[in-house]
Amino acid sequence: MTPPKKLTDKDLVFLKELEALIYERKNQMPKGSYTTAMFKKGLDKIAQKVGEEAVETVIASKNKGSKETIEEASDLLFHLMLLLAKKDISLHKIVKTLRKRHKKGNHKHIGE
């Protein structure tokens, strides 16, 4: 089995740019934007969408191929980022919490 490709600096920059774009859409609410439409629907709808995407990711992961899992996980991550932005929680705060847990030796977040 080939080890998975590692997350690159370019990947991390993209996540930062995507988060910035989501906040920009939240603040400017441009017409015709899916992100704007989701923000207008409110927290309950965004949370529901995160749940739907989580279930779809689980179902896709049970299939043999990885393409569907990658697509559903991408949808899940995007909608989770929308949810976090709706609640004004930055990815930085999530990463900071994960680092803190890891530093304390509480590795439940990585399956230990």
Image: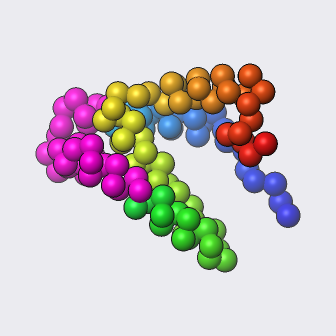
Left or right: 62, with 42 as reference point: right
Give the residue furthest to the bottom: 64
Residue appearing at x 50%, y 37% in the figure: 15
**51 vs 31, nearest the viewer:** 51
Q: Position of residue 102 (x, y in %)?
A: 72, 28
Say if 45 sits above or below 90 in the image: below
- Look at the image and name its color scheme: rainbow
Q: Is residue 35 found inside the magenta-colored segment of the image?
A: yes
Left or right: 106, with 63 as reference point: right
Res 63 quadrant in image:
bottom right
Q: Position of residue 80 (x, y in %)?
A: 43, 45
Residue appearing at x 49%, y 30% in the figure: 91
Give the residue furthest to the right: 1
In the rendered structure, which segment of residues is drawn in magenta? 23-51
Q: How many marks?
A: 0
Q: Is residue 41 found inside the magenta-colored segment of the image?
A: yes
Say if 49 sits above or below 107 in the image: below
**79 vs 15, nearest the viewer:** 79
Say if 99 sits above or below 107 in the image: above
Left or right: 99, with 95 as reference point: right
Residue 66 visible in the picture: yes
Q: Quadrant of the N terminus?
A: bottom right
Q: Quadrant of the C terminus?
A: top right
Residue 67 visible in the picture: no
**110 vs 31, nearest the viewer:** 110
Q: Position of residue 31 (x, y in %)?
A: 14, 45
The secondary structure that dominates the magenta segment is: helix
Residue appearing at x 52%, y 63% in the figure: 57
Q: Position of residue 46 (x, y in %)?
A: 31, 49
